[in-house]
Amino acid sequence: MGRLEIPTGFVEKARFVRVIFTDVEREYDVLLGLLTFGMSWVWRRRLLSKITRRESLRVLDLACGSGLITFPLHRLVGMNGLVVGLDPSISMLQPAVRRKHEGRIPVEFVRAVGEFIPFRDNVFDYETVGLAMRNFGDKKAVFREAHRTLIDAGWFLSFDFVLPRNSLIRKLYLFYVMKMFPIFGKRVSDNWYRTFVYLGKSIELSSPPNAVCKMLSDSSFRSTFFDEITLGVVALLGGQK
């Protein structure tokens, strides 16, 4: 593969990301766990711990992929709650929908983009994003839509890969994601090689968490925060409507 250029426009990037995550869904969950040394499970638990369990919660999981956050969410919402997973990729939604039916798990899935959420105003108590903020073509549009569709005092929560501030850790981390990720991907398939090249590049270009929090504030969220975890390679952040 030649030099990978990631589009910056919303439409172009949305199409690009759909292609990048095509035909990788079967191995996604396993490879994510292996390449993060099991820490992806820890990061999901950290995000879920920010959600106050109560009856009739309504939660929207944006860019839900195979449902790694969507399915655990259903245990937090109560019998009368609602969990919806939203993703633009049919390929990534297929295993999520299959697991839903096989386990008779009461969650719903919708194919859509986070920049245009197909729900009315003031619906959800929480909206979540797991390891996918880098994939949105227009983060400000996502935050505007999240603010519109959240109830008053609702929370937007996300965790994603970021560049560590420590220079030594940053160099080691970039070597791992830019050099080792593609090698692992090539051993699986050409599709995974393409996907891992993209993941490394998207991490290299990722916005620092304070900049993302500034976007949240500019989109009328308050009480914004970010926590850098796991040596600063991941940031958990959020804001309240």
Image (cartoon, helix red, strand yellow):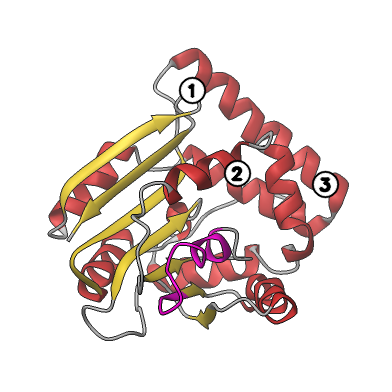
**Callout 2: 10 Å neighbours few (<14), some, many (20+)?**
some
Relative to residue 117, is residue 61 drawn left or right?
A: right
Q: Position of residue 227 (x, y in %)?
A: 34, 34
Q: Is residue 173 magenta?
A: no
| Residue at x 39% of width, y 41% of height | 236
As helix, strand or loop, the secondary structure at mark 1 comes to loop
Q: Nearer the viewer, residue 197 or 106?
A: 106
User: In this picture, which residue range is highlighted in magenta?
Assistant: 69-83
Nearer the N terminus, badge 2 or badge 1?
2
| Percent position of residue 118, x then y | 36, 85
Quadrant in which the C terminus is drawn:
bottom left
User: Foreground: 43 or 199?
Assistant: 43
Q: How many marks?
A: 3
Residue that numbered label 1 is attached to: 231
Give the residue number, with chain letter if any, for mark 2. Answer: 41
Question: Do the CB atoms of the residues marked 2 and 1 lie less than 8 Å apart?
Answer: no
Indicate which disc residue 186 carries. Answer: 3
Under circle 2, the secondary element is helix
Q: Give the alpha-carbon distance from disc 1 to disc 3, as whole Å.
A: 27 Å
Residue type for callout 2: Trp
Mark 3 surroundings: few (<14), some (14-19) or many (≥20) residues within 10 A: some
Q: Main secondary structure of the magenta part?
A: loop
* 80 drawn magenta: yes
| Image coordinates for residue 51, horizontal then vertical, percent | 36, 54
Amino acid type at image mark 1? Leu
Q: CA distance from mark 2 to mark 1?
A: 16 Å
Query: From the viewer's perspective, is residue 16 above or below residue 133?
Result: below
